[in-house]
Amino acid sequence: MPRLDDIRAGYLPLLDSAVLLVAADKGFAEARDVRLILNRETSWATIRDRMGVGQLDAAHMLAPMPIAASLGLGPLAVPMVAPFILALGGNAVTVSNAVAERMATTDPVMDGAAAAGQALCRTVEAARRDGRPPLRFAVVHRHSSHNYDLRYWLAASGIGPDRDIDITVVPPPLMPDALATGQIDGFCVGEPWSTIAVRRGAGHIVTSKAEIWRRGPEKVLGVSAHFAKTRGEVLARLILALHDAAAWCEDPNNREALAALLAAKEHLNVPESALLPALEGRLETAPGKRRAIEGFVTFHGADANRPNPDHGQWLFRQMVRWGDATDSETARDQAAAVFSPASYDAALGRLAPNRDSKRRLSENDRPAGLYDVAEENPASN
Protein backbone atom coordinates (compact mmCIF):
# COMPACT_ATOMS: atom_id res chain seq x y z
CA MET A 1 0.00 0.00 0.00
CA PRO A 2 1.54 3.38 -0.98
CA ARG A 3 2.50 5.84 1.72
CA LEU A 4 0.11 8.76 2.08
CA ASP A 5 1.49 12.30 2.15
CA ASP A 6 0.00 14.36 4.97
CA ILE A 7 -1.43 17.81 4.26
CA ARG A 8 -2.78 19.83 7.18
CA ALA A 9 -5.57 22.12 6.02
CA GLY A 10 -7.71 24.62 7.89
CA TYR A 11 -11.28 25.58 7.06
CA LEU A 12 -14.13 27.67 8.41
CA PRO A 13 -17.59 26.08 8.83
CA LEU A 14 -19.22 27.50 5.71
CA LEU A 15 -21.02 26.01 2.74
CA ASP A 16 -18.04 26.75 0.51
CA SER A 17 -15.72 24.54 2.56
CA ALA A 18 -17.53 21.69 0.80
CA VAL A 19 -14.81 20.70 -1.65
CA LEU A 20 -12.18 20.25 1.07
CA LEU A 21 -14.57 18.32 3.32
CA VAL A 22 -15.71 16.05 0.48
CA ALA A 23 -12.12 15.43 -0.66
CA ALA A 24 -11.28 14.16 2.83
CA ASP A 25 -14.54 12.36 3.65
CA LYS A 26 -15.34 10.69 0.32
CA GLY A 27 -11.86 9.32 -0.30
CA PHE A 28 -10.84 11.59 -3.18
CA ALA A 29 -7.69 12.70 -1.35
CA GLU A 30 -6.71 9.19 -0.33
CA ALA A 31 -7.21 8.02 -3.93
CA ARG A 32 -4.43 10.48 -4.83
CA ASP A 33 -2.20 9.20 -2.00
CA VAL A 34 -2.89 12.25 0.18
CA ARG A 35 -3.99 12.19 3.81
CA LEU A 36 -5.96 15.43 4.13
CA ILE A 37 -5.99 16.37 7.83
CA LEU A 38 -8.66 19.00 8.34
CA ASN A 39 -8.83 21.51 11.20
CA ARG A 40 -12.01 23.48 11.79
CA GLU A 41 -11.01 27.02 12.74
CA THR A 42 -12.95 29.77 14.50
CA SER A 43 -12.07 32.82 12.39
CA TRP A 44 -10.33 33.97 9.25
CA ALA A 45 -7.75 35.70 11.42
CA THR A 46 -6.90 32.33 12.99
CA ILE A 47 -6.45 30.76 9.57
CA ARG A 48 -4.25 33.68 8.49
CA ASP A 49 -2.09 33.38 11.61
CA ARG A 50 -1.76 29.59 11.54
CA MET A 51 -0.75 29.74 7.88
CA GLY A 52 1.74 32.48 8.72
CA VAL A 53 3.56 30.44 11.35
CA GLY A 54 3.45 27.20 9.35
CA GLN A 55 0.98 25.27 11.50
CA LEU A 56 -1.14 24.64 8.39
CA ASP A 57 0.06 23.50 4.96
CA ALA A 58 -3.04 24.75 3.17
CA ALA A 59 -6.33 26.44 3.94
CA HIS A 60 -9.81 27.32 2.76
CA MET A 61 -9.26 31.07 2.32
CA LEU A 62 -11.04 34.24 1.30
CA ALA A 63 -9.94 35.05 -2.24
CA PRO A 64 -8.13 38.33 -1.31
CA MET A 65 -6.30 36.82 1.70
CA PRO A 66 -3.35 35.25 -0.17
CA ILE A 67 -2.89 38.53 -2.01
CA ALA A 68 -2.82 40.46 1.27
CA ALA A 69 -0.36 37.96 2.78
CA SER A 70 1.93 38.15 -0.25
CA LEU A 71 1.93 41.95 -0.14
CA GLY A 72 2.75 42.02 3.57
CA LEU A 73 -0.60 43.52 4.59
CA GLY A 74 -1.28 42.56 8.19
CA PRO A 75 0.64 40.40 10.66
CA LEU A 76 2.60 37.25 9.85
CA ALA A 77 2.83 37.98 6.14
CA VAL A 78 4.09 35.17 3.91
CA PRO A 79 4.22 34.85 0.11
CA MET A 80 1.28 32.70 -0.98
CA VAL A 81 -0.43 31.29 -4.04
CA ALA A 82 -4.00 30.22 -4.76
CA PRO A 83 -3.61 27.21 -7.07
CA PHE A 84 -7.26 26.09 -6.92
CA ILE A 85 -10.58 27.95 -6.72
CA LEU A 86 -12.82 26.19 -4.21
CA ALA A 87 -16.05 28.07 -4.95
CA LEU A 88 -17.58 30.86 -6.99
CA GLY A 89 -20.34 32.92 -5.39
CA GLY A 90 -22.14 31.69 -2.29
CA ASN A 91 -22.53 35.01 -0.45
CA ALA A 92 -25.65 37.06 0.20
CA VAL A 93 -26.39 40.56 1.45
CA THR A 94 -28.99 40.53 4.21
CA VAL A 95 -30.60 43.51 5.95
CA SER A 96 -32.68 43.83 9.10
CA ASN A 97 -36.47 43.71 8.93
CA ALA A 98 -36.65 47.44 9.63
CA VAL A 99 -34.26 48.30 6.79
CA ALA A 100 -36.04 45.87 4.45
CA GLU A 101 -39.37 47.56 5.21
CA ARG A 102 -37.94 51.00 4.45
CA MET A 103 -36.39 49.71 1.22
CA ALA A 104 -39.71 48.15 0.18
CA THR A 105 -41.51 51.48 0.47
CA THR A 106 -39.35 52.76 -2.42
CA ASP A 107 -39.37 49.51 -4.46
CA PRO A 108 -41.63 46.65 -3.34
CA VAL A 109 -40.07 44.19 -5.83
CA MET A 110 -36.33 44.97 -5.69
CA ASP A 111 -35.54 42.46 -8.44
CA GLY A 112 -31.77 42.16 -8.78
CA ALA A 113 -28.66 43.87 -7.45
CA ALA A 114 -29.23 47.20 -9.22
CA ALA A 115 -32.82 47.64 -8.01
CA ALA A 116 -31.96 46.59 -4.45
CA GLY A 117 -29.01 48.97 -4.46
CA GLN A 118 -31.16 51.89 -5.56
CA ALA A 119 -33.73 51.06 -2.88
CA LEU A 120 -31.00 50.99 -0.24
CA CYS A 121 -29.59 54.28 -1.54
CA ARG A 122 -32.95 55.99 -1.15
CA THR A 123 -33.23 54.52 2.35
CA VAL A 124 -29.78 55.85 3.29
CA GLU A 125 -30.64 59.30 1.89
CA ALA A 126 -33.90 59.39 3.88
CA ALA A 127 -32.07 58.44 7.08
CA ARG A 128 -29.58 61.25 6.49
CA ARG A 129 -32.37 63.79 5.97
CA ASP A 130 -34.08 62.62 9.16
CA GLY A 131 -30.85 62.88 11.16
CA ARG A 132 -30.68 59.17 11.95
CA PRO A 133 -27.24 57.56 12.51
CA PRO A 134 -25.62 55.75 9.55
CA LEU A 135 -26.54 52.14 8.96
CA ARG A 136 -23.93 49.62 10.10
CA PHE A 137 -23.07 46.62 7.90
CA ALA A 138 -20.83 43.70 8.82
CA VAL A 139 -18.35 41.72 6.75
CA VAL A 140 -16.26 38.73 7.79
CA HIS A 141 -12.76 40.20 7.36
CA ARG A 142 -11.20 43.39 6.03
CA HIS A 143 -9.39 41.46 3.27
CA SER A 144 -12.47 39.54 2.11
CA SER A 145 -14.50 39.29 -1.05
CA HIS A 146 -17.48 40.14 1.15
CA ASN A 147 -15.95 43.51 1.99
CA TYR A 148 -14.96 44.37 -1.57
CA ASP A 149 -18.16 43.03 -3.19
CA LEU A 150 -20.28 44.94 -0.68
CA ARG A 151 -18.32 48.15 -1.21
CA TYR A 152 -18.42 47.73 -4.98
CA TRP A 153 -22.20 47.25 -4.91
CA LEU A 154 -22.77 50.16 -2.53
CA ALA A 155 -20.61 52.55 -4.56
CA ALA A 156 -22.24 51.48 -7.83
CA SER A 157 -25.60 52.25 -6.18
CA GLY A 158 -24.56 55.76 -5.16
CA ILE A 159 -23.75 54.96 -1.52
CA GLY A 160 -20.35 55.94 -0.16
CA PRO A 161 -18.85 53.21 2.04
CA ASP A 162 -17.22 54.84 5.11
CA ARG A 163 -19.10 58.06 4.29
CA ASP A 164 -22.76 57.04 4.22
CA ILE A 165 -22.60 53.77 6.19
CA ASP A 166 -20.32 52.09 8.72
CA ILE A 167 -18.67 48.75 7.94
CA THR A 168 -17.44 46.51 10.74
CA VAL A 169 -16.10 42.94 11.08
CA VAL A 170 -18.15 40.14 12.69
CA PRO A 171 -17.42 36.36 12.54
CA PRO A 172 -19.91 34.57 10.24
CA PRO A 173 -21.75 32.46 12.86
CA LEU A 174 -22.43 35.55 15.00
CA MET A 175 -24.01 37.63 12.24
CA PRO A 176 -27.62 36.40 12.59
CA ASP A 177 -27.63 37.20 16.32
CA ALA A 178 -25.94 40.56 15.74
CA LEU A 179 -28.67 41.42 13.22
CA ALA A 180 -31.47 40.19 15.48
CA THR A 181 -30.26 42.26 18.45
CA GLY A 182 -29.80 45.44 16.41
CA GLN A 183 -26.02 45.60 16.72
CA ILE A 184 -25.82 45.72 12.93
CA ASP A 185 -28.32 46.69 10.21
CA GLY A 186 -27.07 44.32 7.53
CA PHE A 187 -24.26 42.01 6.52
CA CYS A 188 -22.56 40.23 3.64
CA VAL A 189 -21.68 36.63 4.47
CA GLY A 190 -21.38 33.15 3.01
CA GLU A 191 -24.16 30.65 3.40
CA PRO A 192 -25.82 29.28 5.43
CA TRP A 193 -25.82 32.33 7.72
CA SER A 194 -28.15 34.50 5.63
CA THR A 195 -30.66 31.65 5.38
CA ILE A 196 -30.42 31.12 9.13
CA ALA A 197 -31.00 34.83 9.78
CA VAL A 198 -34.11 34.78 7.58
CA ARG A 199 -35.48 31.67 9.28
CA ARG A 200 -34.94 33.23 12.69
CA GLY A 201 -37.04 36.17 11.51
CA ALA A 202 -34.12 38.57 11.81
CA GLY A 203 -33.80 39.86 8.24
CA HIS A 204 -34.32 39.69 4.48
CA ILE A 205 -31.85 38.74 1.75
CA VAL A 206 -31.75 41.59 -0.78
CA THR A 207 -29.01 40.51 -3.21
CA SER A 208 -26.13 38.08 -3.65
CA LYS A 209 -22.57 37.86 -4.89
CA ALA A 210 -23.80 35.96 -7.93
CA GLU A 211 -25.80 39.07 -8.90
CA ILE A 212 -23.00 41.52 -8.09
CA TRP A 213 -20.16 39.52 -9.70
CA ARG A 214 -21.36 36.50 -11.63
CA ARG A 215 -18.82 33.66 -11.40
CA GLY A 216 -16.54 35.73 -9.20
CA PRO A 217 -14.02 33.73 -7.11
CA GLU A 218 -15.05 33.54 -3.48
CA LYS A 219 -12.95 30.93 -1.67
CA VAL A 220 -9.60 29.53 -2.75
CA LEU A 221 -7.10 26.96 -1.63
CA GLY A 222 -4.27 28.96 -0.11
CA VAL A 223 -0.75 27.54 0.20
CA SER A 224 2.57 29.20 0.87
CA ALA A 225 4.80 29.84 -2.12
CA HIS A 226 7.43 27.75 -0.30
CA PHE A 227 5.04 24.79 -0.07
CA ALA A 228 4.16 25.08 -3.76
CA LYS A 229 7.86 25.12 -4.68
CA THR A 230 9.16 22.41 -2.37
CA ARG A 231 6.17 20.05 -2.42
CA GLY A 232 4.93 20.65 -5.92
CA GLU A 233 4.28 16.98 -6.69
CA VAL A 234 2.16 16.57 -3.54
CA LEU A 235 0.31 19.79 -4.35
CA ALA A 236 -0.44 18.46 -7.83
CA ARG A 237 -2.05 15.38 -6.33
CA LEU A 238 -4.06 17.52 -3.93
CA ILE A 239 -5.30 19.64 -6.85
CA LEU A 240 -6.42 16.48 -8.66
CA ALA A 241 -8.24 15.29 -5.53
CA LEU A 242 -9.97 18.65 -5.15
CA HIS A 243 -10.90 18.63 -8.83
CA ASP A 244 -12.62 15.25 -8.36
CA ALA A 245 -14.32 16.40 -5.16
CA ALA A 246 -15.54 19.62 -6.80
CA ALA A 247 -17.17 17.64 -9.61
CA TRP A 248 -18.91 15.49 -6.98
CA CYS A 249 -20.14 18.60 -5.13
CA GLU A 250 -21.53 20.16 -8.32
CA ASP A 251 -23.54 17.06 -9.28
CA PRO A 252 -27.23 17.74 -8.45
CA ASN A 253 -27.66 14.05 -7.59
CA ASN A 254 -25.35 14.56 -4.60
CA ARG A 255 -27.06 17.62 -3.07
CA GLU A 256 -28.78 15.81 -0.22
CA ALA A 257 -25.68 13.77 0.62
CA LEU A 258 -23.56 16.95 0.50
CA ALA A 259 -25.99 18.79 2.78
CA ALA A 260 -25.90 15.87 5.23
CA LEU A 261 -22.09 15.83 5.27
CA LEU A 262 -21.79 19.58 5.78
CA ALA A 263 -24.52 19.68 8.43
CA ALA A 264 -22.70 17.24 10.71
CA LYS A 265 -21.85 18.43 14.22
CA GLU A 266 -18.11 18.21 13.56
CA HIS A 267 -18.44 20.40 10.45
CA LEU A 268 -21.04 23.22 10.20
CA ASN A 269 -23.39 21.91 12.92
CA VAL A 270 -26.51 23.34 11.30
CA PRO A 271 -29.72 21.70 9.98
CA GLU A 272 -29.47 20.16 6.51
CA SER A 273 -32.50 22.21 5.53
CA ALA A 274 -30.50 25.41 6.05
CA LEU A 275 -27.99 24.32 3.40
CA LEU A 276 -30.27 23.09 0.63
CA PRO A 277 -31.59 26.50 -0.55
CA ALA A 278 -28.09 27.66 -1.50
CA LEU A 279 -27.19 24.30 -3.06
CA GLU A 280 -30.39 24.43 -5.11
CA GLY A 281 -29.92 28.09 -6.03
CA ARG A 282 -33.37 28.98 -4.72
CA LEU A 283 -32.97 31.14 -1.64
CA GLU A 284 -35.51 31.91 1.04
CA THR A 285 -35.15 35.69 0.88
CA ALA A 286 -37.84 36.38 3.50
CA PRO A 287 -40.21 34.19 5.51
CA GLY A 288 -42.40 32.42 2.96
CA LYS A 289 -40.64 34.00 -0.04
CA ARG A 290 -38.17 32.26 -2.33
CA ARG A 291 -36.19 33.50 -5.32
CA ALA A 292 -34.14 31.57 -7.85
CA ILE A 293 -30.62 32.99 -8.28
CA GLU A 294 -28.73 31.54 -11.23
CA GLY A 295 -25.27 30.32 -10.29
CA PHE A 296 -25.66 31.29 -6.64
CA VAL A 297 -22.78 28.96 -5.75
CA THR A 298 -20.60 27.01 -8.17
CA PHE A 299 -18.11 24.33 -7.18
CA HIS A 300 -17.10 23.03 -10.61
CA GLY A 301 -17.63 23.32 -14.35
CA ALA A 302 -15.87 25.05 -17.27
CA ASP A 303 -12.92 26.88 -15.70
CA ALA A 304 -14.54 27.45 -12.29
CA ASN A 305 -11.59 25.90 -10.42
CA ARG A 306 -8.82 27.44 -12.52
CA PRO A 307 -7.10 30.54 -11.08
CA ASN A 308 -7.21 33.63 -13.30
CA PRO A 309 -4.56 36.38 -12.92
CA ASP A 310 -7.12 39.00 -14.00
CA HIS A 311 -9.23 38.11 -10.98
CA GLY A 312 -6.22 38.66 -8.74
CA GLN A 313 -5.66 42.07 -10.28
CA TRP A 314 -9.34 43.05 -9.95
CA LEU A 315 -9.27 42.18 -6.26
CA PHE A 316 -6.05 44.14 -5.86
CA ARG A 317 -7.63 47.18 -7.50
CA GLN A 318 -10.39 47.03 -4.90
CA MET A 319 -7.79 46.84 -2.13
CA VAL A 320 -6.16 49.98 -3.53
CA ARG A 321 -9.51 51.68 -4.07
CA TRP A 322 -10.52 51.26 -0.43
CA GLY A 323 -7.17 52.16 1.09
CA ASP A 324 -5.96 48.67 1.99
CA ALA A 325 -2.96 48.65 -0.38
CA THR A 326 -0.68 51.02 -2.25
CA ASP A 327 -0.73 50.76 -6.01
CA SER A 328 2.43 49.90 -7.94
CA GLU A 329 3.32 47.84 -10.98
CA THR A 330 5.20 45.41 -8.74
CA ALA A 331 2.19 44.94 -6.46
CA ARG A 332 -0.13 44.43 -9.43
CA ASP A 333 2.20 41.75 -10.78
CA GLN A 334 2.35 40.07 -7.37
CA ALA A 335 -1.45 39.99 -7.14
CA ALA A 336 -1.69 38.43 -10.59
CA ALA A 337 0.98 35.87 -9.70
CA VAL A 338 -1.01 34.72 -6.65
CA PHE A 339 -3.76 33.65 -9.08
CA SER A 340 -1.40 32.02 -11.57
CA PRO A 341 -2.91 28.89 -13.17
CA ALA A 342 0.53 27.24 -13.56
CA SER A 343 0.15 24.64 -10.77
CA TYR A 344 -3.44 23.89 -11.76
CA ASP A 345 -2.57 23.41 -15.43
CA ALA A 346 0.46 21.28 -14.60
CA ALA A 347 -1.62 19.03 -12.34
CA LEU A 348 -4.54 18.55 -14.70
CA GLY A 349 -2.51 18.33 -17.89
CA ARG A 350 -4.83 17.61 -20.77
CA LEU A 351 -7.87 17.86 -18.47
CA ALA A 352 -7.21 21.58 -17.85
CA PRO A 353 -9.52 23.95 -19.76
CA ASN A 354 -7.85 25.26 -22.90
CA ARG A 355 -7.83 28.88 -21.80
CA ASP A 356 -5.38 31.72 -22.28
CA SER A 357 -4.00 32.58 -18.83
CA LYS A 358 -3.51 36.16 -20.02
CA ARG A 359 -7.07 36.60 -21.28
CA ARG A 360 -9.08 39.64 -20.33
CA LEU A 361 -12.17 39.37 -18.17
CA SER A 362 -15.26 38.54 -20.21
CA GLU A 363 -18.58 40.23 -19.48
CA ASN A 364 -19.65 37.23 -17.41
CA ASP A 365 -16.49 37.47 -15.29
CA ARG A 366 -16.99 41.13 -14.46
CA PRO A 367 -19.05 42.46 -11.58
CA ALA A 368 -22.56 43.39 -12.67
CA GLY A 369 -23.71 46.95 -13.14
CA LEU A 370 -21.64 49.94 -14.20
CA TYR A 371 -18.28 48.20 -14.15
CA ASP A 372 -16.09 51.03 -15.40
CA VAL A 373 -18.26 53.83 -14.02
CA ALA A 374 -18.38 52.26 -10.56
CA GLU A 375 -14.58 52.26 -10.45
CA GLU A 376 -14.72 56.04 -10.80
CA ASN A 377 -17.91 56.61 -8.80
CA PRO A 378 -17.54 59.68 -6.54
CA ALA A 379 -19.49 57.77 -3.89
CA SER A 380 -16.39 55.64 -3.37
CA ASN A 381 -14.36 58.61 -2.18
Image (spheres, rainbow, N blue to C red):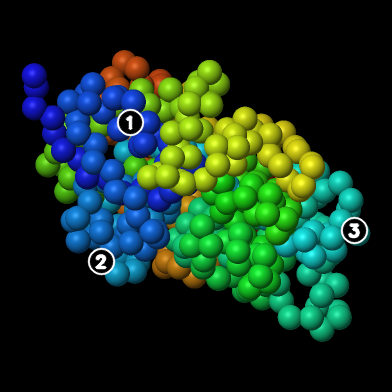
Residue 108 disc label: none
Tell which tag, 3 or 1, sits nearer the viewer: 1
- SS under mark 1: helix
For the N terminus, the quadrant is top left
Where is residue 123? Give x, y as percent.
82, 66
Q: Residue at x 82, y 75 (%)?
A: 127
Which one is earlier in the sequence, the residue at label 3 or at label 2? 2
| Residue wearing tag 2 | 76
Dot 1, crowdedness within 10 Å: few (<14), some or many (≥20)? some
Which one is earlier in the sequence, the residue at label 3 or at label 1? 1
Q: Residue at x 34, y 26 (%)?
A: 26
**Left or right of 263 in this view: 8:** left
Which one is earlier in the sequence, the residue at label 1 or at label 2? 1
Residue 106 disc label: 3
- SS under mark 3: helix
Q: CA distance from mark 3 to mark 1?
A: 48 Å
Where is residue 110? Give x, y as percent.
82, 48
Where is residue 137? Give x, y as percent.
63, 66
Against 371, residue 344 (above or below) is: above
For the C terminus, the quadrant is bottom right
Q: Amino acid at mark 2?
A: Leu
Q: CA distance from mark 3 to mark 2?
A: 46 Å
Q: Amino acid at mark 1?
A: Asp
Q: Amino acid at mark 3?
A: Thr
Please name whichever residue, 134 or 158, is drawn nearer the observer in this view of the structure: 134
Dot 3, crowdedness within 10 Å: few (<14), some or many (≥20)? some
| Residue wearing tag 1 | 25
